[in-house]
Amino acid sequence: MDETAFVNETKTKMSHAIEAYKTELAKIRTGRASTGLIEAVNVEYYGSISPIIRLASISIPDSRTISINPWDAGSLPAIEKAIQKYDPSLNPSNDGKSINIKIPALTQERRKEITKQVGKLSESIKQEIRNFRRLSNEKIKTYEKSKEISEDQSFKIQKKVQDLTDNFIKEIEEITKHKEKEISEV
């Protein structure tokens, strides 16, 4: 058994979980505009469903506005409808060439709700990281029982996996703190 490959495989799984967490956080609304709020919108246009990013360019002209400039002006009504369906709290306005979405300021109560949501998401991703650690440790113990690796090797690999887990948990906490700070900014 190649211990470096084993540890790297575990590290890759944990890294993918962190990337998925970052993607989910980008979808969570803060008081400022973010393209992540609408990148997941799917638009029905000419009988097929396409992600909004394939139909238009999305930009942030200022901290409270999302601007959507479609490649085809005929797709404006479909994009507007899809945004309203995706998130009724977003209110797109169409000027015939582009769509602008003004992001309203969050109330203190809503900020608390969003912070709780981020906390729950953080805990679930930490649990996922711990599950990767548990599965890796079970696999290591299986190798040890079948005499493919020694007890010392098993301990050494488990220590590396634990260090990985600790580092990823710390990274999740830093990402979460940053997002909570973003949410609390007025």
Image (cartoon, rainbow, N blue to C red):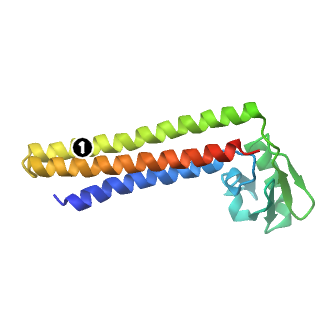
Q: Position of residue 160 (x, y in %)?
A: 26, 52
> What is the x, y in percent for residue 38?
71, 52
Dot 1 falls on a residue whose secondary structure is helix
Q: Quadrant of residue 70?
A: bottom right
- Crowd band around label 1 with a 10 angstrom C-alpha radius: few (<14), some (14–19), many (20+): some
Residue name at image x 61 percent, y 47 percent: 179
Which residue is rendered at x = 68% and y = 33% of the image? 112
Q: Quadrant of residue 8?
A: bottom left
Image location of residue 63, percent across then percent down? 78, 56
What residue would you read off at disc 1?
Answer: 137
Quarter of the image holding residue 73?
bottom right
Q: Say if 145 sits above or below 72 in the image.
A: above
Image position of 162 (left or right of 40)? left
Most extreme residue toward the bottom is 71
Position of the N terminus, as image quadrant, is bottom left
Q: Residue at x 41, y 49 (%)?
A: 168
Identify residue type, mark 1: Asn
Of the pair 164 and 27, the residue shown nearer to us: 164
Q: Position of residue 109 (x, y in %)?
A: 74, 30
Asked if residue 35 lies left or right of residue 146, the reply is: right
Q: Quick one: 154 or 23, which is closer to the camera?
A: 154
